[in-house]
Image: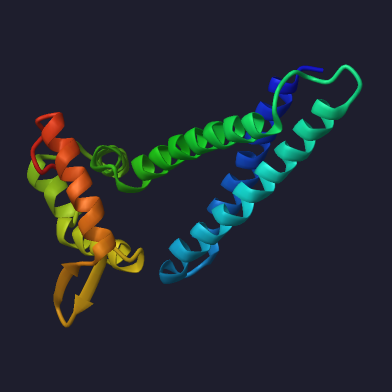
Amino acid sequence: MNLTLLILAICFGGLSVYVPLHVSVFRFLRPEKRWGATRGLFLIVLPLVLIVTAWVSWRAFNSPGGFPTSPVVDVFACFTVLALLHLGYLTFYAFIDRSITLRTFIEIKNADEPLTFQDLAKRYDTEAAYLRRLEILWQSGYLAKTGGSYELTSKGVFVGNLIRRLKSLYKLGPGG
């Protein structure tokens, strides 16, 4: 049996458990409970996958004619693969959740006739979308709300500085 393939299968298995649970959280929990539940879910699935990987690797390492690898290396590799799979999934999720392009496709598909720019602008409430994003940032701890005003938390300042530097590196504008 190939230990590398087994560890990859464990990583994919962990993600295949996480994704349906994540979908369930977002379908059945109120919006203000979703982000904490998602974070908790990942903090449960990640250690379980790493523990299973360590156990499998340790058994393979200590078996007669065992694999010339270290369980520590295997766990680190599994963590890396799982983190990359999770980032890919989050990119997919953000795309389907926040993409103006996808929203435009949906609006045009659902229309009975071709739409002008003005028609699309009426259908896509940018103010509501912006308020939703502010609410998500507040619930995630990146913004503090006082009355009708928002300000960055220390977590928000850190991420804001990081993103500003990345956008500067790529010579991108503020964007959305």
**Residue drawn at the location 65% of the way across and 34% of the way down:** 72
Q: Residue at x 56, y 55 (%)?
A: 43
**Vertical comparison of 155 with 103: above or below:** below
Quadrant that contains the C terminus? top left
Q: Position of residue 127 (x, y in %)?
A: 15, 61
Where does the image place residue 67, in percent across and percent down from the top left? 78, 19
Question: Does residue 27 appear to the left or right of 48 in the view shown?
Answer: left
The quarter holding residue 155 reads bottom left
Foreground: 136 or 62?
62
Q: Quadrant of the N terminus?
A: top right
What residue do we see at 46% from left, 69% from top?
33
Residue 24 in sight in this render: no
- In this rendering, would 8 be left or right of 132? right
* Vertical arrangement, residue 121 with respect to residue 129, above or below: above
Q: Which one is nearer the viewer's eye here, 83 or 134?
A: 83
Q: Residue furthest right?
A: 64
> In which quadrant of the rendered view does residue 2 lie?
top right
Query: Is 62 placed left or right of 142 in the picture?
Result: right
